[in-house]
Image (cartoon, rainbow, N blue to C red):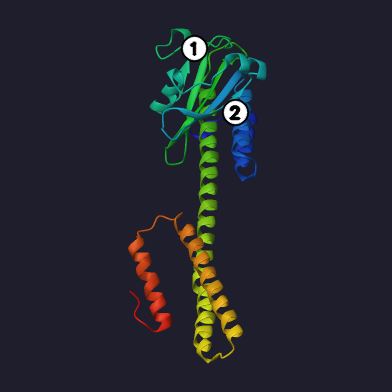
Amino acid sequence: MKFRELRDPDRLHALIDAMLLMETEATLSSLLQQIVATATELAGARYGALGVLARDGTTLSEFITYGIDAKASAVIGHLPTGKGVLGETIMGGQPLRIDDLAHHAGSVGFPEGHPAMHRFLGVPILTRNGHIWGNLYITEPLNDEAFSYDDELLLATFGRVAGAVIDQSNLRRELRELSVAEERERLARDLHDTVIQRLFGVGLGLQMALPHVSDDDAAARINLALDELNETIHDIRTTIFEIDQDRATDDTLRHRATALTNEVGSRLGVQAH
């Protein structure tokens, strides 16, 4: 299944166009829909579909079709779950060509209202390292002839393109999640190292000045300000802890309490327990 084995110039150009889809900002579903449509048309088939495996590795979480209109889809009802010949291309990890689905041992039949399908060509969707994301298949050649080895080569290559698109989409999502996590960590660190330190400093200064204030009204205002500072520090710490809950760490409640008492002790110059 080598890229260089494809000999048809039109197919090669279309395949290159499909590979360039990876550089666009279109949604994953839109990209996969384009891949299914292009592969089906180039292979001269009436129907095409692409199934993406769910996290359980056996059922399909997404199923994209080509050649079946909305009315026919409504009649068919539920989508395939990856059983029968569809499951064979996934579990076996190899292309599968069938001249007559009705007489194939792995066929489980079609639901009522499903278009008649006899000839079948399916391939696994593979990543560069060989991981299987799902399957890509076409049925019913328009010329009513059996699918050829060249058709198999074409579809297998499109399967790898689809795998690369899915892989890249997952990588982008992971990078976004990582960026968000890093930004939350930076925010928590800034809140702790900068904002809380300043508030501690202000509160400590007010506490040291309080014994020297003779005016009762001024002393009451200072005490009120100290209460508000303590409440603000508590709110910020609560926010920091909530941010920390989204990260997998080995910190326990005891560790956090120890860290807090150590910080209070160091700032007030006393040993806190």
Residue at 57%, 29% (x, y): give it.
7
Residue bearing the label numbered 1: 99
| Label 1 crowd bin: few (<14), some (14–19), many (20+), radius 10 Å | some
* Depicted 188 relative to depicted 62: above or below: below
Where's residue 129, x and y in %? 42, 41
The circle drawn on residue 160 is none
Where's residue 128, x and y in %? 46, 41
Can residue 167 be seen here? The reply is: yes
Q: Could you tell me the amino acid type at mark 1?
A: Asp
Can residue 190 be seen here? The reply is: no
Residue bearing the label numbered 2: 36
Q: State the SS at label 1.
A: loop
Q: Earlier in the sequence, mark 1 or mark 2?
A: 2
Residue at 43%, 23% (x, y): give it.
87
Q: Could you tell me the amino acid type at mark 2?
A: Val
Q: Are marks 1 and 2 in contact (CB under 8 Å)?
A: no
Q: Say which quarter of the image contains residue 45.
A: top right
Q: Say which quarter of the image contains residue 77.
A: top right
